[in-house]
Image (cartoon, rainbow, N blue to C red):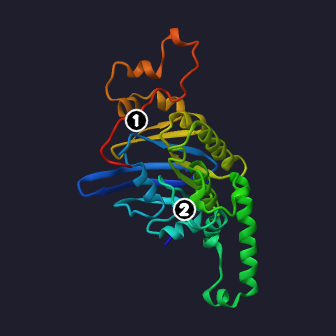
Amino acid sequence: MTQDLNDTQPYRRILLRAVGMSKRFGALAAVSNVDFDVPRHGIVSLIGPNGAGKTVFFNILTGIVKPDSGDIWFNGKRINGQRPDRITHLGIARTFQGIRLFKKMTVLDNVLVGNHTHLSRNLFEVVMRSMRVQDEEEVARKRSFELLDFVGLRAHANTEAGDLPYGMGRRLEVARALATSPQLLLLDEPTAGMNPSETAGMVDLISRLRRDLGLAVLLIEHDMKVVMRISDRVSVMDYGIKIAEGSPDEVRRNSLVIEAYLGRSANAERELNPPEAEANQEPDTSGGLQMRPRTVTG
């Protein structure tokens, strides 16, 4: 059941708000009392070392994992307890860390699957091939080709998804998510495993999601160059706790963030803020942040 936020509260510019989100798995506190906002049309990055709880937090937002406590508001309505398919229908779509495509289906058919949440046909109409079914299928095909154009894959529409190069597979996942007509797109490590050229293309695609489609984007990303380049705001998690939040420049200079990524190191501050002697060198937009190994994923 959904519940409306009080219209007098200044929530209208906030698309998604999570309040006091917590989730434990036995003795492990994967997410601990996390508050989180995503503004309309914003690009927000969620970063942190491996095992920080980022993917668990994504799974909570999309209904895959039920939180132990906390509330989730989307478009001013409380969506706690909604099934993943219902959350998708409300306007939240996502991709995953590992590519999850229907590899034996064509690129076009993979995108057509994403249209399913907005089809109103029933089994009888499908069997009888009613006019409404035919009209909906035609609209879905047209929309799917438009999305393939948007992600640069129209020429591969009839290719089996399993035959696509890795970077194209990532783009296809985005197209399929877009087929659900989201307002908020969650991207879980969208540039993971990409070469520099593919990464640059994905960064451009993410930027166009907002500029051309008006979407809000929340992404988990380990490539700090990507994070610093495209984010309006960055939030940082460590051991299930949100330890910092702010602009990319504020976050890269935050002492708690430096500790989370690098541990206590005499060189940490120098890596983030190179001395004057290095001022003429091309800046490292990653902010010097490197991943600190963890034994737990997410």
Nearer the observer: mark 1 or 2; the answer is 2
Residue nearest the viewer, comparing 148 with 15: 148
Residue at which label 1 appears:
291
Q: Give the structural element (helix, strand or loop) at label 1.
A: loop
Residue farthest along the top direction in this orientation: 277
* Residue 87 appears in the figure: yes
Residue 199 vertical placement versus 288 (above, below): below
Query: Measuring 34% from the left and 61% from the top, which residue is drawn there?
Result: 68
Residue farthest along the left direction in this orientation: 27
Q: Answer whether labels 1 and 2 touch (C-beta < 8 Å).
A: no
Badge 2 local density, few (<14 within 10 Å), some, or many (20+)? some
Residue at which label 2 appears:
101
Q: What percent of the width, then of the height, locates residue 112?
A: 65, 68
Query: Measuring 35% from the left and 30% from the top, which residue is drawn there?
Result: 259
Query: Measuring 65% from the left and 42% from the top, which residue is drawn there?
Result: 201
Amino acid type of the residue that numbered disc 2 sits on in the rendered structure: Leu
Relative to 201, 16 lies left or right: left
Based on the displayed image, in which of its 4 quarters is residue 289 positioned?
top left
Based on the displayed image, in which of its 4 quarters is residue 27 positioned?
bottom left
Based on the displayed image, in which of its 4 quarters is residue 232 positioned?
top right
